[in-house]
Amino acid sequence: VLTFAGNGEPTAHPHFAGIIEDTLALRDIYFPQAKVSVLSNSTFIHKPEVFDALNKIDNNILKLDTIDTDYIRLTDRPTGHYDVRKIIKGMKAFKGNLIIQTMFMKGKYQGQDVDNTSDRYVLPWLETVKEIAPRQVMIYTIDRETPDHDLEKATHEELDRIGKLIKDSGIPVSVSY
């Protein structure tokens, strides 16, 4: 698998579409069985050239941790204007050619509760996921040390419960602990 991810948002690169075109062409020549994946925070999917490039790859993995704007501002801290409704509209435009990736966690951040494993966050998120109709959902929790030591991993039981809700809605799900 050839994966674009890492330090920063891959789709923010001014030549992202060209890089994907070149990657796919080289992949087809040298490693035709290899998959191409992009892990994206979804902020640039409204740009036609980014949308088109993501639609060509094998694994278009887009983040959607919640649909709650206040939660997003607190935990994800997007720079500039972030419109979750615009992100959701962009995700729907892929017509199922995407994988939604969501991180669940608990604890406190800057003194505020950030537990997005409760029905308050999960149920509206799940309804939105069903509307988007991705080909898969990946859920996971904190995997490494965080800047704030009051953040906690979601438990296996919490992730399994959320995973079952997704599966019961007819969407394939992978759960990582």
Image (cartoon, rainbow, N blue to C red):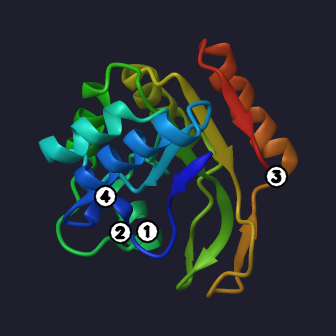
Q: Is residue 61 left or right of residue 144?
A: left
Given this view, does label 2 or label 3 mark the residue nearer the observer?
A: 3
Q: Is residue 8 above or below residue 61?
A: below
Q: Which mark is residue 11?
A: 4
Residue 177: mark: 3
At mark 4, the secondary structure is helix
> Mark 1 highlights which residue?
76
Select label 4 or label 2 by which is in front.
4
How crowded pointer 1 is (Cα within 10 Å; few <14, some 14-19, many 20+) is rated as few
* Amino acid type at image mark 2: Arg
Q: CA distance from mark 3 to mark 4?
A: 27 Å
- Tag 2's secondary structure? helix
Amino acid type indicated by mark 4:
Thr
What residue type is disc 3 on? Tyr
- Kindly check if marks 1 and 2 are in contact, taking CB atoms under 8 A apart as contact: yes
Residue annotated with mark 2: 73
Q: Position of residue 67 (x, y in %)?
A: 39, 46
Mark 4 or mark 3, which is nearer the start of the sequence? 4
Tell whether 49 sits left or right of 102: left
Mark 4 to mark 2 CA distance (whole Å): 21 Å
Count of residue discs: 4
Dot 3: few (<14), some (14–19), or many (≥20) neighbours within 10 Å? few
